[in-house]
Image (spheres, grey):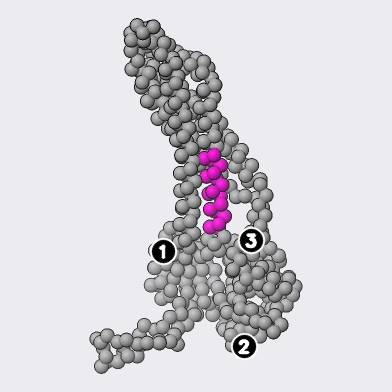
Amino acid sequence: MNLRLIFSIAKSLLIARWRQTLVAAVGVTFSITMFIALLGFMTGLNDLLDGLILNRTAHVRLYNEIEPNGQQPITLAPEYKGSYNIVRSIKSVNSRERIYNSGAIIQALKKDERVIGIAPKISAQVFFNEGAIDITGVVNGIDAQAESRLFHFDDYIISGHSRDIAIVSNSIILGKGLADKLLATVGDVVQVTTISQERFPLKVVGIFQSGVQELDKVQSYASVSTVQKILGKPNNYITDIQIKVKDIDKAPQMAREFAQLFNTDTEDIQTANSQFETGSFVRSLISYAVGITLLIVAGFGIYNILNMMIYEKMDSIAILKATGFSGKDVNRIFMVIALSIGLFGGVLGLLFGFLTSLGIDQIPFNTLALPTITTYPVNYSPAFYLIGSTFSIVTTYLAGWAPARKASQVDPVVIIRGK
């Protein structure tokens, strides 16, 4: 049968029932629009929330855990060898935070093709002196340039510049919550006391806000050399080596490898932030479920409309079959009708979904916890549009298959005799 004729007949049937056709197309359009907008917004929100932590977390971290020595004297004594010894109240006397041979380790990591970059770090527990009150805090000694390049450190500086801690001697960048407690701004001098009761004045050259309020109340940042000076340690003293790798999925395997190679404790990003990955997966799953449900509901609407069209057009179907149209031809006509509705509604849905996403992206979103975010986050991944268009075609095809099959099985003799 001539395909042009089949398309012409399908067009005539669509126009004859244009109101019902429009309702079906609007259902598909609305479903695709909400699918694109909802998935783009939820994925953008996931990226934002995960970025607050994941962007600031090393893919692999090398450090030394403070823990008791597993080889106690009693286990080394010959007379107790092979015995089951119970030792209580073991103290961590010989544990060390420092990573030995840190320079050699860093050089070895730089030669590893799987590694993007390395950022050394020192963490020091201190007290910030505010009059007669001591506020507990942490000073992180960092390489500002490496932190900005690998972990987006500059994105969270709301006042001052990160590079100043490397330029200005004895300087510090305070967390927003800590700066509020100390009533300190850029240019002020704060007093820091170490656990060994050494006091140091540090000049505030910046304010940092990560978006995690509890961290901002205790965290501060200085150069590696400044923290070494505060702790009274040599210039090769490093407590952490942060590593960013090319393939984040290989981080657990590389962490185990580095632990054996460098004789240090390691932690990979998946282990450190497993709860965030779980939350992101659940939110994305809910978004996909809601969007696909909308498409299925639209499919039922198309199914009902085509069923009604078949019952109302029994005479036309009988005449078509009586004049030489086969059951396959009638089937093709109604499948063309269903797919036309899906294609037209799908294209409009993709367009309106994109426009809705643009609208959401322009809505102001101002919060003190996230100073760098000004509008609601939206993800414009092409995958969402591909999935939406595919589901619109598949759903309308399945919705039209049963009515089209029913129309192809109509017996023209029975219909004409009944008339």
The segment highlighted magenta reads 34-51
Tell me the quarter of the picture where residue 325 sits. Answer: top left
Report the disc number at residue 197: 2
Instruction: Look at mark 1 in the image and give the residue it sits on.
Output: 252
Q: Which marked residue is nearer to the observer: mark 1 or mark 2? A: 2
Instruction: Look at mark 3 in the image and give the residue it sits on.
Output: 369
Q: Are marks 1 and 3 in contact (CB under 8 Å)?
A: no
Q: Nearer the viewer, residue 243 or 137?
A: 137
Q: Residues within 10 Å of mark 3 (few under 14, many from 20)?
A: some
Q: Residue flagged by tag 3: what amino acid is it? A: Ala
Q: Residue at x 54, y 29 (%)?
A: 26
For the residues labelled 1 and 3, the Cα–Cα distance comes to 31 Å
209 left or right of 412?
A: right
Q: Residue flagged by tag 1: what amino acid is it? A: Pro
Residue 113 visible in image: no
For the residues labelled 1 and 2, the Cα–Cα distance comes to 39 Å
